[in-house]
Every structure is written in C-alpha cells, then in structure tokens.
Image (tube, rainbow, N blue to C red):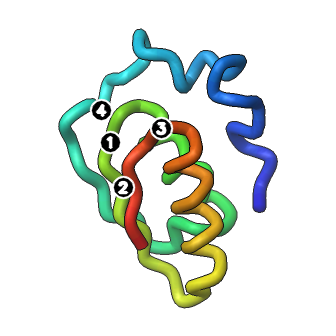
Amino acid sequence: MSAVCRAPATQDPVWQDDMRRLEGKGALITGGATGIGQAISLRFAAEGARVILAQRNTGAIEQTVAEIKSRGGWAEG
C-alpha cells in the first residue's frame, strides 16, 4: 500500500469536515486499489465521494476498501 493518507483521521486535515468537496458524488476508479489509483480512491473518499474500486487484485481492493471505511468513508470493490 502506498504512503498516502496514513495519519489517523483525527490528525489528517483531508479527513476533516471542512474539506468535503465531493460530498454526494460517486466515483468509479479503475485500478483504484494500488499506486496512483489507490491515492485517488483515498483522496476522493476523504473529500466525501462514494468510491467504487475496480482492480484485478481482489486482495488489494479489500485492503483499500477497509482503509477507507475505517476512516469514515464509503467504498465498495
């Protein structure tokens, strides 16, 4: 997993309510569980988007979805 958005939600300013620009929007992210796609998935979720991940590696999807949900975001894979 990449080093993007690793701080706990309480310390990471991206996960604060004042930066929810994508609230109420959805995103389908291909390759969303690794590399740049994962960084995009984490950021979009932090910004309030509902994120659906598409990736061949289902283990990576499960990890990324779990991380997003643990931070209070919405994700499916």
Q: Please count the marks in the image.
A: 4
Inter-mark Cα distance, 1 to 4: 5 Å
Please name the residue that numbered disc 4 is placed on.
22
Label 1, secondary structure: give it: loop
**Residue 37 in view (yes/no):** no
- Dots 1 and 4: beta carbons under 8 Å? yes
Please name the residue that numbered disc 2 is placed on.
51
Measuring 42% from the left and 15% from the top, which residue is drawn there?
A: 17
Q: Residues within 10 Å of mark 4 (few under 14, many from 20)?
A: some
Nearer mark to the viewer, of 3 and 4: 3
Indicate whether 36 appears above or below 18.
Answer: below
Q: Position of residue 65 (x, y in %)?
A: 52, 61
Please name the residue that numbered disc 1 is placed on.
49
Indicate whether 3 appears above or below 51.
Answer: above
- Dots 3 and 4: beta carbons under 8 Å? no
Nearer mark to the viewer, of 2 and 3: 3
The reply, left or right, for residue 28 in relation to residue 5 is: left
Please name the residue that numbered disc 3 is placed on.
72
Q: Mark on residue 20?
A: none
Chain-order first, disc 2 or disc 3: 2
Q: What's the amino acid at mark 3?
A: Gly
- Dots 2 and 1: beta carbons under 8 Å? yes
Q: Residues within 10 Å of mark 1 (few under 14, many from 20)?
A: many
Label 4, secondary structure: give it: loop
